[in-house]
Amino acid sequence: MSIVDKKACKPVTEPGKRASKACLVSYIKDGGASIMLKALGEPIRFLLKYGGIDFEDNRVEFDDWPKVKPTIFFGQLPIYEEDGKKVNQSIAISRYLGKKVNLVGNSDWENLEIDAVVDTINDLRLKLVKYSYEKDEKIKEEVKGPLFNEILPFYLEKLEKIAEASNGHLAINKLTWADFYFIAVLDYFNYMAEMDLLENRPSLQKVKENVTSIPVIKDWITIRPDTYIRARSNAVLPYGPESIMAVVTSAHRVANNPLEWILIELSTVFRTLGRRD
């Protein structure tokens, strides 16, 4: 079965029928462009792969989302199904799977530390979402300065210090599901920030290495579906699993006129292709 087989998780469109194994349904959307990104469903995939748990991976494409949304409780993705039971909320699912694959602490306090850092990562995500998905260019410009000059440095410096003190981990000095969560959503964060957030942050880079060097995760990164960005010109620009350094759809945000937009887009195309893994 194809990893993007839309028929994989029948309970999404046929309530009452059970999947034969664990089932994950996810999607990503973006205003004005068609995008397939490794977003909030990816930590769940990382954890399932790490634990050797067989699962059906159903990606809902952006154009299909309006038809699928009414069939989903709370109308949110990703959702996870196991033994006929379904649940949404990516962090809760990741925490559950973290326990299942033994990527948790040895005490309630250690698990509290893990939860705290994951919630902090999610706080950072919400700051990026506020900027990246804002359609009003005036408001976007107002939040841009504080985001890049204050908020991102503040969060990333704190996370860097945590990783440095924890030997390349984000909690309790060992590999936990918090490390998986952060690295799995990193491409999505980089896309929204339009930059490599780990640049010049060696301890966070070590967190990434500690996760992506695990054989099953390394294999998954190699075989998982290509990620692509379709710009307004409908040109499909693939990018490698480790890099999301340039995004064509960001060109319109900084261009002052159509000619400048075209020049920026062409420049970004060449940079993207040049960085492809």
Image (tube, rainbow, N blue to C red):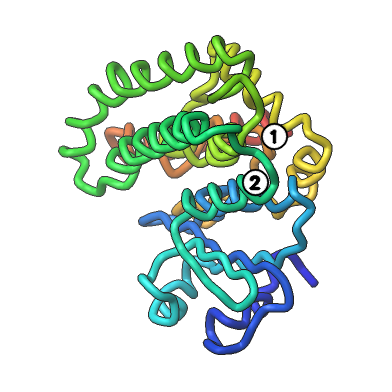
The answer to which of 90 and 142 lies nearer the viewer is 90
Q: Residue at x 70, y 25 (%)?
A: 210
Q: Is residue 181 above or below residue 48?
A: above
Q: Is residue 211 above or below residue 63?
A: above
The answer to which of 3 and 78 lies nearer the viewer is 78
Question: Can I make out residue 264 in this image?
Answer: no
Answer with mark 2 or mark 1, whichever residue precedes in sequence. Answer: 2
Crowd rating for badge 1 (residues with CA inside 10 Å; few <14, some 14–19, many 20+): some
Q: In the displayed structure, does residue 72 sit left or right of residue 49?
A: left
Q: Which residue is mark 2?
A: 238
Q: In the displayed structure, does residue 265 sit left or right of residue 129?
A: right
Mark-to-mark CA distance, 2 and 1? 8 Å
- The quadrant holding residue 178 is top right
Name the mark on residue 9.
Answer: none
For numbered disc 2, what is the local secondary structure?
Answer: strand
Q: Which residue is mark 1?
A: 276
The answer to which of 8 and 119 lies nearer the viewer is 119
For numbered disc 1, what is the local secondary structure?
Answer: loop
Please identify the quadrant where the C terminus is shown: top right
The amino acid type, in three-letter code, at marker 1 is Arg
Circles 2 and 1: CB atoms closer than 8 Å: yes
The answer to which of 26 and 253 lies nearer the viewer is 26
Q: Residue at x 65, y 24 (%)?
A: 174
